């Protein structure tokens, strides 16, 4: 078999793995939208659907991991291709963890509904933070598909927006709890829920860092944003 044919087969395998990563990411994004819909509309049925779909995301991670291990074993990739596969593995880990956070949101929504959270709590205000997180995840997947480092950098910078939304929501919840101690328990549920949304944004940021690692060969985890910008050039 010619080297060219082997190379084309390897490229096809890498493309297949990338496609599966995008499918997994798309499912996590859809799950996030459903979880927040369940909260805003107090839909127990939708919350159950999100919880049940968590297993599918976990299975997708296992499938991609198997494909990566199989490809490394059979192809013995060069440094650049091995870097790509390592970044893919880190990406699926972050997607799986984001999926865990979304499932956690759905479980908290289920608890909130069953415990009869007061309607005057600002549940609808979580929609903006969740929209930001979902947008970050969607842009990250787009950046991954294109290996676009400029977009990846913008995503890393955009993580601060979700952090600000979380801080603002926290201050609002503290006000509610001070004004009416009866809201303390449900407010804490909402606080943990908001934190899970913020963590989805963190995982999107982590994936964006892996995109830069693929393209530039530089590990920019735990690196200040200005230095990440200098890596991209």
Image: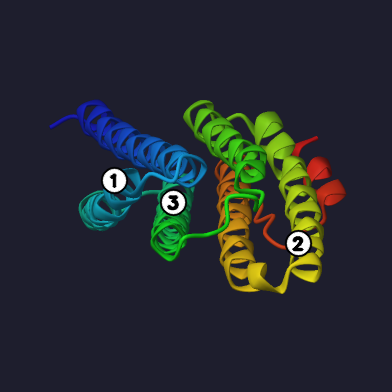
**Residue that badge 1 annotates:** 45
- Cα–Cα span, label 1 and label 2: 28 Å
Which mark is first along the chain, 2 or 1?
Answer: 1
| Quadrant including the N terminus | top left
- Is residue 121 something that shows in the picture? yes
Mark 3 or mark 2: which is in front? 2
Where is residue 161? Give x, y as percent.
77, 43
Pointer 3 residue = 95
Judge left or right: residue 85 versus residue 154: left
**In the structure shown, which secondary structural element does the residue marked by tag 3 occupy?**
helix
Where, by quadrant of the figure, is residue 156 drawn?
Answer: top right
Residue 209: x %, y % from top left: 63, 49
| Element on which disc 2 rests | helix
Place residue 171 in its image quadrant: bottom right
Earlier sequence position, callout 1 versus callout 3 = 1
Q: Residue at x 58, y 31 (%)?
A: 139
């Amino acid at each position: 078999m010619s080297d060219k044919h082997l190379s084309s087969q390897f490229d096809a395998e890498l493309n297949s793995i990338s496609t599966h990563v995008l499918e997994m990411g798309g499912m996590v994004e859809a799950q996030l939208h459903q979880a927040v819909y369940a909260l805003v509309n107090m839909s127990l049925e939708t919350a159950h659907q999100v919880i049940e779909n968590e297993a599918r995301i976990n299975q997708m991670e296992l499938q991609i991991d198997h494909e990566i291990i199989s490809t490394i074993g059979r192809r013995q990739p060069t440094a650049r291709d091995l870097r790509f596969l390592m970044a893919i593995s880190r990406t699926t880990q972050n997607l799986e963890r984001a999926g865990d956070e979304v499932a956690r949101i759905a479980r908290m929504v289920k608890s909130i509904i069953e415990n009869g959270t007061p309607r005057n709590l600002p549940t609808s205000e979580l929609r903006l933070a969740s929209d930001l997180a979902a947008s970050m995840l969607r842009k990250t997947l787009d950046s991954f598909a294109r290996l676009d480092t400029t977009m990846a950098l913008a995503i890393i910078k955009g993580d601060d927006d979700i952090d600000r939304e979380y801080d603002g929501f926290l201050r609002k919840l503290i006000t509610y709890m001070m004004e009416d101690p009866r809201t303390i328990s449900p407010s804490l549920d909402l606080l943990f829920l908001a934190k899970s949304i913020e963590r989805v944004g963190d995982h999107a940021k982590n994936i964006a860092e892996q995109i830069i690692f693929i393209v530039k060969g530089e590990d920019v985890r735990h690196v200040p944003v200005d230095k990440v910008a200098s890596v991209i050039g």
